[in-house]
Amino acid sequence: MKSTEIALATAPVEGLSIRNRLPGTVQDVSTGDAMASVRVTVEDGALTAAITKDAADDLSLSPGTPVVALIKSTEVALTAP
């Protein structure tokens, strides 16, 4: 899945159509002038979310911050074993 298609929340989100919600912990935050790359550890893996620097600042994201990764179902691909 594309990092630009992953949203992050630091609190429960209600009234949202996104059903794929993975609890995790921020591992690393790399910021540039406008964007931030946030590495999140989730059960059995990790993912990276590309969000705005302003959003990362507003959420006070730093290593150890608990988050929920929100992923639209159109971005999820299932594979058979």
Image (cartoon, helix red, strand yellow):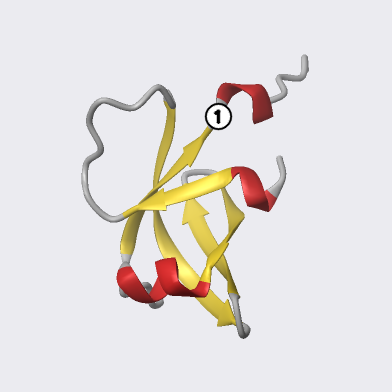
Give the percent coordinates (x, y) of residue 51: 54, 61
Which residue carries the number 1 mark?
72
Residue 78 occupies which quadrant of the picture? top right
Residue lying at the far top of the rendered structure:
80
Nearest to the observer: residue 52 or residue 60: 52
Decide: is 33 above or below 52: below
Q: Is 21 rendered above or below residue 56?
A: above
Left-right relation of 56 to 13: right
Residue pictured at 49% horizontal, 57% vertical = 41
Residue at image x 47%, y 44%? 43
**Amino acid of disc 1:** Lys
Q: Residue at x 52, y 76 (%)?
A: 29
**What secondary structure is found at the residue carrying circle 1?**
loop
State the quadrant of the C terminus.
top right
Above-or-below relation of 7 to 39: above
What x and y, as percent, mark residue 24?
Answer: 40, 52
Instruction: Please give left or right for residue 24 compared with residue 30 in the image.
Output: left
Q: Position of residue 36 (x, y in %)?
A: 57, 72
